[in-house]
Every structure is written in structure tokens, then in C-alpha cells.
Image (cartoon, grey):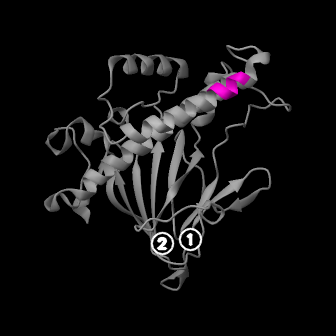
Amino acid sequence: TQKYRMIADGDLFGYNVPSAAKVLFRAICSDEIMGGSSSSSQKQPWPDDMDGGELRCASVDVASRLHTLLVGCVDEVMLITKECMGIGSSSSGKSEGRMRQAQRKRKRVSSSATTCNAIPGNKKKENSQDSTKKDAAIGTIHVPRTLEEAKYCPLDYFLYHGKSIVNDKPVINCSEHIDRGILICVSLTGVPGLEVLCRSTQQFLCPETLSKSTLRESGFSDLVCVMAGDQLRKVANVAMDTDSLNDKGDKSDTFSACVHRVKDKLEHVRLSITYELRGT
């Protein structure tokens, strides 16, 4: 497995064993879009290249889809944040603005469903011009609009062994934490394990238990859970043109990063696929 593991510039690529509870395979798919294995800058190791590269192809497709989804979510957050602050619209037009946002969201989801199979970047020039304007609006946080730019956005495959005790010691699958990126997308599975902290009740909830989703033959749901990362606060504050203050005079925590974990007692072995949109 060592040949499928590489560390470059402090970033991990490929296979790793974070703890006794799980193994990880991390894929950075931007190099695949830019030139694949023939590219001199390609760092990502793939274990199945001799078998036709099925994992490589599937990973690029999944990363493309999830990247498109998360960038669309960031755009929606920017729109809603500006509207709530009354930027660029009068208060009397807020209701109509929400309707327009809902319509834009439906169109975006419909459009993504038909185009996400294509390699990102093969778009019309006017789209790249729009992207430049959006990047400028976000300011100090650069949101990678396409997978080619996603040099630090990992697609992670976490395989949890589902054992509560290893070598006579209790196993912690994944303790509560936040992620550093802008948004994080986690696939829901038939083995409930993901738990997110509800800020209003300060209790952990399991999206896989609460959601009414359809499981596919692969064991994965048709739903994903999108969570706020630590960088989302910075993106939202730029949208408001200020580090806004709440009633106590503190910086706004409207977009605080989502605290989450994986519960220790799993019913079975659990495969979790996550994608993190990271700004630079």
C-alpha cells in the first residue's frame, strides 16, 4: 500500500491509516482534469491503473458532480446573505427576491444534472467571465469555480471497520470536529454513522436516521449532507462587506462551521465518501 501513498507540499495523496478505526484513500482529482497520468505535475497515485482505471474515472466523475453542487451552494449563500443585509435591493422587494432565488436554484439544479458528466472547464467564454466577477466579489477567499482549480479539494473514501474494540482498547471512529474548507459534502449510507451538532439544542443528530432517502444497490443513499466549514464565515462576511456584529457586539456566528463526528458503535463496516470545497 505504500506505493499508493504520497505526500507533496504537506498534502496527502492516496492511501493512509488515520487510526485503528479506519483507513482512508484521498483523491485530488484536479490533476486528472489537467492532464491525467501523462502530466508531469500529476501526483495522485491510483491503485487500479493496471485494471483500466475504474476507480480513477469514477472518482473524477464524483468529484466533478460534488464540486458543481458545492459551488452552486456557495453562490446561493452569497445571494441570500446580501438580500438579508439589504444589499442591492429595497426591503419592499425582498419577498420577490426570495422567489427569484428559488427559481434560480431550481434552474441551477436542473442544469447541473445535465452537465456534470462533462469535464468542468469546457464551457462558454461568458461563463468564465461570470466566474471572474464572482471571484472578485468574494475578495480574499478564492473559490475554485472548476475542478481544474481545485488543487486542495479532497475527495475522501473513509472505510470504517465497524469495530468498537481493537487490541482490547475502545475505538473512536471520528471525534467531534470542524473542517477547514468552505463547504463539505458527505454521502449518506445505509449504515448510519454521521452525527452533526444542532446549535439550537446542542444535541447531535444523525442525518441518515432522520432522512427518508432511497438506498441504491451500492448501499449509498440518493442524498448527501452539506455542512458549513470554517472558511464559509469569511466568504459570508465578505458578502456583507464587513465582519458583522451580533447583539452582543461579537463577530457574527451565523455561518459557524458545523461540528460533526462519526458515532463509535456502527452496525456494520461503513464506507463514507466526502468532498471538501476549500478556498485559497
Q: Is residue 67 above or below residue 144?
A: below
Q: x, y percentage for residue 26? A: 36, 54
Pick whichever, 24 or 125, lies toward us. Answer: 125
User: 10 Å neighbourhood of mark 1: few (<14), some, or many (≥20)?
Assistant: some
Q: CB atoms at circles 1 and 2 under 8 Å apart?
A: yes
Pick whichever, 220 or 275, lies toward us. Answer: 220
Q: Which amino acid type is shown beneath numbered disc 1?
A: Ile
Residue 183 forms part of the magenta stretch: no
Q: x, y percentage for residue 203? A: 75, 60
Q: Is residue 251 above or below residue 63?
A: above
Q: Is residue 31 above or below residue 132?
A: below
Residue 85 seen in the figure: no
- Tell whether 157 sits left or right of 41: right
Q: Secondary structure at mark 1?
A: loop
Residue that numbered label 1 is attached to: 172
Label ID, residue 274? none
Magenta stretch prevailing secondary structure: helix
Query: Going from the N terminus, do you reach mark 1 or mark 2 first?
Result: 2
Instruction: Give the residue displayed 47% in from the left and 27% down from the top.
Output: 142
Residue that numbered label 2 is attached to: 21
